[in-house]
Image (cartoon, helix red, strand yellow):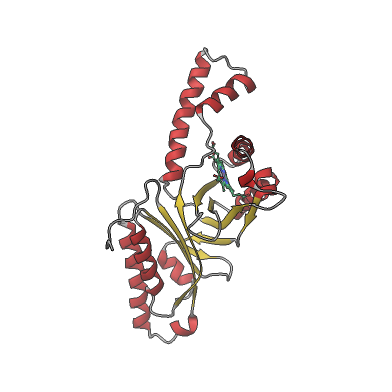
Amino acid sequence: MEKNTALIPEEGWHCLHLFYRVEYGQWQLLNREEQNVAKTNLASLVQEVRAMDSTQTLTLNMVTPKADIGFMLITPDLHDVNKIEKRLSLSLGADILTPVYSYLSLTEESEYITTEEDYARTLEKEQNIKPDSEKFAEAMKSFREQMKHYRQERVYPRLPDWPVVCFYNMSKRRGEQRNWYALPYDERRKLMKGHAVVGREFAGKVKQLITGSTGLDDAEWGVTLFARNTFQIKAIVYQMRFDPVSAEYADFGEFYIGIQLPLDELFRRLQL
Ligand code: 76R
């Protein structure tokens, strides 16, 4: 068996969401000094991970008692995901952090991203811009730049520092009445176009990271939303529900809401 050969996907990075409960009964059995050593241990682990190549870690203070503390990790090599998860779980000492929920996925480019042909058609047919005009050429140029950036951000994202973070999983229905996977590609593509129109209304207000998890975890995607306040999270999830892709074809898992905080503030709030 090959040992420790890097397990790096052909495309994309691994993404792991981890949510823990703090076992206060156990924590209180430690003396002040042991508690300080434990906190320093977690803080230096986070620092070490943040210094790794192409690796990002967010520390989250969870808002509802479903969990107390959350981490979102993005890193290329599955060995690192595995090692970091084990170390994080034990970082405050044995039996202090109990995992309550976790989610493994991969960043991905969607198969429904608007193509140049799609966009050219929209310009010509819906906006009546002539293909041989300068305006058309300019619009295509800025579209190309925008899409290059968008693709890069989906597959190799830079996580924003926006404070409110919402995570949930999502699958597309495979029922008798509604089966997304039995629809022809063109139909799915058309539906996804409508989805993107709703999504774009939230430009600058919500940043989303959609990561694929078929074969990796229980649902088909992880949805991570970043916003400056909870209003925008509620608004986008509500709006999306009227869009046929979500209304007719989507099933959701539990929702987790956290606030991005530096570890020292997070420890204070958790009264650790
Ligand atoms: O412009 C393009 O061509 C890309 C458009 C786009 C795709 C392909 C897009 C735009 N999304 C795509 C794919 Mn999305 N998205 C979700 C959710 O809560 C819910 O109802 C659903 C959860 C939100 C909130 C959201 C937001 N999207 C996907 C996929 C993969 C589908 C597949 O491959 O089968 C899923 C599961 C999914 C779910 N989406 C956008 C947004 C927002 C805000 C946008 C606009 C982004 C932008 O243009 O910057």
Label total for image: 0
Residue 188 image offset from top left, x and y in percent: 61, 39
Quarter of the image for the N terminus: give it. Answer: bottom left
Furthest-right residue in this view:
177
Residue 4 image offset from top left, x and y in percent: 28, 61
**Foreground pick, 267 / 114:** 114
Residue at 39% over, 75% down: 92
Ligand 1 lies in which image quarter? top right
Residue at 44% over, 78% down: 96
**Foreground pick, 230 / 137:** 137
Instruction: Indicate the quadrant where residue 128 lies.
Output: top right
Furthest-top residue in this view:
132
Q: Is residue 249 above or below residue 90?
A: above
**Foreground pick, 40 / 55:** 55
**Foreground pick, 7 / 136:** 7
Residue 180 image offset from top left, x and y in percent: 63, 46
Residue at 49% over, 81% down: 24
Residue 268 image offset from top left, x and y in percent: 45, 71
Instruction: Indicate the quadrant where residue 203 lies.
Output: top right
Quarter of the image for the C terminus: give it. Answer: bottom left
Q: Is residue 245 above or below residue 92?
A: above
